Image (cartoon, helix red, strand yellow):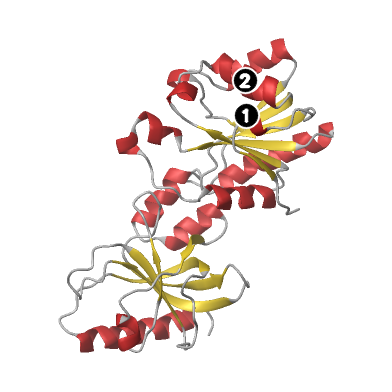
Amino acid sequence: MSHRPAVWRSLAEIPADLGATAVVVGNFDGLHRGHRVVVGRARSEADAAGLPLVAVTFDPHPIAVLRPEHAPPQLTSIPTRVELLGAAGVDGVLVLPFDREVAAWSPQEFVDRVLVSALHVRTVVVGANFRFGARASGDVALLREAGGRQGFSAVGVELDGGPQVWSSTYVRTCLAAGDVAGAAEALGRPFTVTGVVVEGDKRGRELGYPTANVPTSAAEAAPADGVYAGWLTRRDTGERHPAAISVGTNPTFDGERARRVESYVLDRDDLELYGVEVEVAFIERLRGMVRFEGVEALVETMHDDVRRAREILGG
């Protein structure tokens, strides 16, 4: 079941005639396998009650408002999160703008304003460790108590995982180590970076390996600097190409400071991708980022990178 869910960017945007709903609440950054267990349980509860399923997520991440210096890099943009939630079976997504005012709501205020008044909740599903309200003082037990008084049920779902519980923090830890295979295992799909291709310095073209450059910001997660095998997909046409992908700042050439994702599509120098939105999927790490003494050593290593990427990607 994959469809485009309705999206509401504030409580005011929720239709006045929205009937009773089942609700699942969480940040859902990355929508990893643990999240999907929770959403899957919510979908089952919704189906059993004959209700549409609404996901409530927050923008920005609450930590970015409460402790900006500790804000985690974002694994998925809101549009990507909405797409993933739709693919998981959600009918509507409330993207609740998170600010100091919302942060100050008591748990009961959150229940009253969001779950009861806006969404007419009949059943709400959250991860077992879910906390909400001012100073994270609300938990599943409080949700159940409120539900008993206000006519809805509350379900806390244990997070899934092997020896390591799947979590957004675990995915970020994998990415920081360059372990894109570990990140993919936790996500249930390869980690991706999406963006519009910008003009670079054309250095790759001069070296025989033209690349599609996508800038990244400190607020967005990306794998550790290095070279990876993966896939580049055009978002407009869906065309997918095998690629050798470099993440970093080009240490061999001084003066490059902007971190970016550069994808060389294997054996293609004829693709015109400037201005095109692409999705870059990371499959396996080839090596860390190295500063080469000269262009010759760099080109030789790039040649080896391309050979290994081709082997990994089945080309």
The percent coordinates of residue 52 (x first, y second) are 77, 37
Instruction: Please name the residue shown 63% across and 52% down the image.
Output: 83
Residue 53 or residue 254, whichever sits in front? 254
Figure quadrant of residue 289:
bottom left
Instruction: Please name the residue shown 68% across and 28% down the image.
Output: 124
Q: Is residue 170 above or below residue 258?
A: above
* Amino acid residing under circle 2: Arg
Q: Is residue 305 above or below residue 25?
A: below
The percent coordinates of residue 88 (x first, y second) are 68, 49
Q: Badge 2: how crowded within 10 Å, few (<14), some, or many (20+)?
A: some
Q: Is residue 289 above or below residue 177?
A: below
Q: Is residue 35 above or below residue 260?
A: above
Q: Which residue is mark 1?
A: 11
Gap between marks 2 and 1 measured at Cα: 8 Å
Whether the residues at callouts 2 and 1 have beta carbons within 8 Å, the answer is: yes
Q: Secondary structure at mark 1?
A: helix
Query: Considering only order in the chain, which callout, 1 or 2, is on the residue closer to the N terminus?
Result: 1
The percent coordinates of residue 293 (x first, y second) are 15, 81
Q: Which residue is mark 2?
A: 113
Residue 144 or residue 107, whichever sits in front? 107
